[in-house]
Image (cartoon, coloured by chain):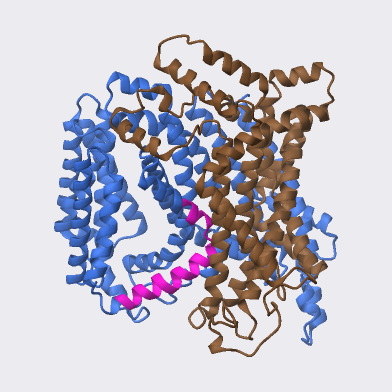
Amino acid sequence: MLMYSVRRLITAVFILLGASFLVYNLVAIAGNPLEELLVSNSPNKEQLIAQRVEALNLDVPAPVRYFMWLGGVLGCFAGQCDFGQNLAGTPVTQLLANAIYQTLTLVLASTILSILIGVSLGIVSALRQYSALDYTVTFASFLFFSLPSFWIAVLLKEFLAIGFNDFLRNPVVTIPTTLLISLVAGIFWYSASFGKQRTRYLMGLVGFLLTAGMIVFVSATQWFLTPFLGIPFMLPLGLGAAVLFTYLVAGLRNRRALGTGLGMVLVGLIAYFPLQGLLAQATLLMVVIILAVFMALGWVLGLLAGGYDRGQGARVGLLTGLAMALLIIADRFMQAWPEYISNSRIKGRPIPTANASTPNLQGDFWVLGIDTMTHILLPTIALTLISLASYSRFSRASMLEIMNQDYIRTARAKGVSERAVVMKHAFRNALIPLATIIAMDIGGIIGGAAITERIFAFKGMGTLFLDSLAHTDPNPVMGVFLVTGLMALIFNLVADLLYSALDPRVRVKA
Amino acid sequence: MSSQEQKSSQKLAKEPTTETTAMRAVETNLDIRAQESVGKTQGQIVRKRFRQNTGAVVSLIILLLIFLLSITSIGVGPIPGWWRYNYNDMHPIINGAAPNAQHWFGQDATGRDLFAMTMRGIQNTFLVVVLITGIAGFLGVLFGGLAGYYRGWVEAVIMRFTDMIIIIPLMLLTAVLGKLAGSYFTGVWNTVMFGVVVGLLFWSSLARLVRAEFLTLREREFVDAARLAGASDMRIIFKHILPNAIGVVTVSISLMMSSAILTETGLSYLGFGIKAPDWSLGSLISANQSAFATRPWLFWFPGLFILAISLAINFVGDGLRDAFDPRQKKFNPKKAKERTAHSAENGLGIDGSQQASVQVSPWQEQDKSQPASKSSS
C-alpha cells in the first residue's frame, strides 16, 4: 500500500509537470500580456511596457520562462513560495489565498447538502423502486442534471430572492397557498413512507397537518421577521431527532440507545440557558468547540449506558448531541435575525443577489454569520440542485445492485429486521462506490464553480481564472491550475486507496 | 453477445438441475433471454427493448423535431427556410418587442427576431455537440481500446496522457483553447473549430471506460480463438472486441452528448465559445440576462430549449442503458409494481421468474472486476 502510494505520487508529480508545461505555453499563445499597453495612449507607454517585461520576464521565450516560473514554485519546498505576480503586481499566492477562501465558503455547504440529500433520495427511491416516488425522483434528477447553471441561477435571483424580500414586507401566507404546500408535503410523506396502506395514509395525513400547522403558525407569529426556536420548539425537534437516529442506527427496540438519545435532548435543553451568556461573545472557534463537546458528550453517554451493543448507543448519542448543538446555534442565529434585517445596510431586504458579503457591515459574529449565509443561500441552492442529481442517480443504482445480492437474501432469511437489512447490510455497502466518487468530487471543489461564481459575483477560483484569462494575465492562471490539478491528483489517489480500504476484495498492487 | 453463449444458455435452460430458488432464478433468467434472443442479432434485441421504453422514444422524437424545426425554419447556409426573418437583420419593433404573431418569440433590444436567433443557436449547438462527441468518441475508443488491448508500455503511456488531460479541469482548458480558436477563425469556422477543440479534450473518461471493458474482453475465449485462427491485432480489436463493447460505448457517448451541450452553452455564456454575430443558446442568454425584468422572453426561450434538448438526450441515454443492460429484463412497470408491493414486506419475490436477477449476466460480472483492474496502473 505504501509503495503503491509513493509510486502514484511520483507519477502524479510528473503528470503535473507535463500538464503545467502544456498549460503555460498555451496561456502564452492565448494572448500577449502587453497588448493592453501597446494600444494605450498613455504618455509613459514605453516605460510601462519595459516595467511589465521586467516584472514578468517577457523577454524570455515562453518554454524557457516556464522553468523560471517552476523555480519559484519549487521554492515552496524551501519555505518560500513564489507563484509570480499578476499584472497589477499582487503576488499570486495572496490572490490564491483569497480566492480559495471565497470558493470554499461558496461550495462547501452545497457539496455537503447535495451529498446528504442526494444519497438519501437515491436510497429511498431504490427501496421504493418503480413507485411514483421513484419516478418522480428520477425525473427530477434528470431535470436538475439538465439545468444550465447560468439559467437556474438567474431564475433563483429573480423569483426566490426578490420574491422572498417582497414577501417579508407583509409576511402572511394566504389560505390557498397554505393548502397547496401542505398537500404537496402530504403526498411526499405518503409516497416516501412504507408498510401497510393504512400507515401510509396516516403518514400522508400527518405530513399534511404538520405542514399546514407550521405555515399557519409562521404566518400568524410573523416568524420570518422575528424567528425563534426556544424550548417549545427545541423539545419536539430534539425528541424527533433522538427517535429518528435511534430508529436508523439502533432500532427502537434498543431501549438503552433510545435512552441515550433522550438523555442528550435533556442535556441540550439544560445547557441551553447557561450557554446563552457564553454565546453572546462567540467566535467561530467557540461554535466548533461547542459542537465537538456535545458530540463527545453524547458518545460518552452512549458508552456509559452500556448494554448489548454500546457502539450503537454511542452513535445515537453523538448524532443527537450534534442535532441539539445545531439547534442551540440555530436558535442563537435567529435571535440575531431582527437585528440583521433592521440594519441600515440591509434595509429589510435580507436575500442579496450578488457578492459574498455586504460591504461595511458592522456587527458581532452572529450578524456577520447571517450575512454570509444569506449571501451563499442562492448559489448554494443552484449548485445543490445541479450536483444533487448525480449523487441520487448513483446511490440509487448502487443500492439496487446491493439489494439484489445473495447476502441480503441471506440476512432476510435469518430473520433480520428490514431496518437492519437496509441500514447495516445494504446501505453501508452501497456507500463504497459512492465514497470514491465523493472523494473525487471533493478534489474538484477547489476549482470552484466558474459560472456560478461569475453570476453571483463571488471572487473565487473560477472568477480569478476567468478574469486573468480575459486580461491575458499568465501567472494567476497558472496558480489556479496548479492548485486544482494538485488537489485532483491527490484526491484521485485518495479515492483509489479508499476503495481498497473499504472493499477488501479490491487490492492495490504494490 | 456471441452466439456460443446463446447456445450454451439454451442448453442450460433445458436441463433443470437443482431445486434451490437461486438456481431457478438463474434458469428462468436464461430462459427468458434465450426466448428473447432466438434468431435475433444483438442490434435487433437492443432496438426492440429501446422501443418498449416510452420515455426514451418520446424523447428521441422530440429531439428529432427540435432538430428539424431548427433546420427547416431558417434554412442552412444558402438554402432558405420557411421563417421570414433571419438571425442578424434588425426589424422595426412590433408590440414592444414582446412575442406576437409576427415574431413568435419576440425581438431583442435592437429589433432582431428571437425565433430566428434561437433556431440559429440550436443549429450551432447541434453542430458543436456532434463534433465534440464524434471526435471525443473516436479518440476515446481508439486510445481506450489500444491501452486495454496492448497493455504494457502502450497502456502506461496512454493512461498517463489521459491522466494529464483529466486533471486539467475541462472548463479551464477549453476556455484557453476556445479563446485561441476564436482569434484565428471566423464565422462558421469558429464554431467548427470550437467543437473540434473541445472534442480533443473530451475523450478522457470514455477512454478509461473503454480500456476497462477491453481489459476484461481480451481475456475471453473468443479472442483467443480469433488469435489462433491468425487474425491480426487490428482485426481482433475492431471486429471481435469492439462489437462486444459497443453497449458501454453507445451509452457513454449518449451521456457525453448531454454534458457536451451544457459545456458548449456554458462556455458560450462565459464568452469563450460561439461569439456574436453568430449565436449559441448560451450566448443568447448571456446577452439578454440583464433584460430579465423588462423582456423575460429573451431569457426564457433559449433556456427552455437547452433544458429540453439536454433532458431529451438524458432520457435517450437512459433508455439505451436499459436496452443494453442485460439485467433489465423485460421491463414491465405493472409487474414490477406488483413485485415491489409484495417485496416491500418480504424482500425479494418468492418466485424467481419475476425477478430481474443478477446472477448470470456476463457483462455485469466483469463490471465488478473493474475497480480491481485500476490497480494495474
Classify residue B197 as left or right of residue A449: right
Instruction: Report the residue at 52% width, 76% height from top.
Output: B297
Instruction: Report the residue at 56% width, 43% height from top.
Output: B51
Q: Quadrant of residue B305?
A: bottom right
Q: Which residues are magenta?
A: A141-167
Classify residue B166 as left or right of residue A136: right
Image location of residue A81, percent across then percent down: 65, 54
Please tell me which residue lies in front, A452 or B150.
B150
Image location of residue B328, percent across then percent down: 50, 34
Image location of residue B25, percent across then percent down: 44, 20
Classify residue B95 as left or right of residue A309: right
Q: Is residue A15 above or below residue A234?
A: above
Please tell me which residue lies in front, A483 or B33.
B33
Q: Is residue B291 above or below residue A329?
A: below
Work out which quarter of the rendered image holds the N terminus of chain B and state it: top right
Visible residue check, residue A221:
no
- Of the chain colours in the picture, the one used for chain A is blue
- Of the chain colours in the picture, the one used for chain B is brown
Q: Main secondary structure of the magenta part?
A: helix
Q: Is residue B349 above or below residue A342?
A: above
> Across the whole image, how many numbered discs are drawn on residues?
0
Visible residue check, residue B357:
yes
Please tell me which residue lies in front, B305 or A411.
B305
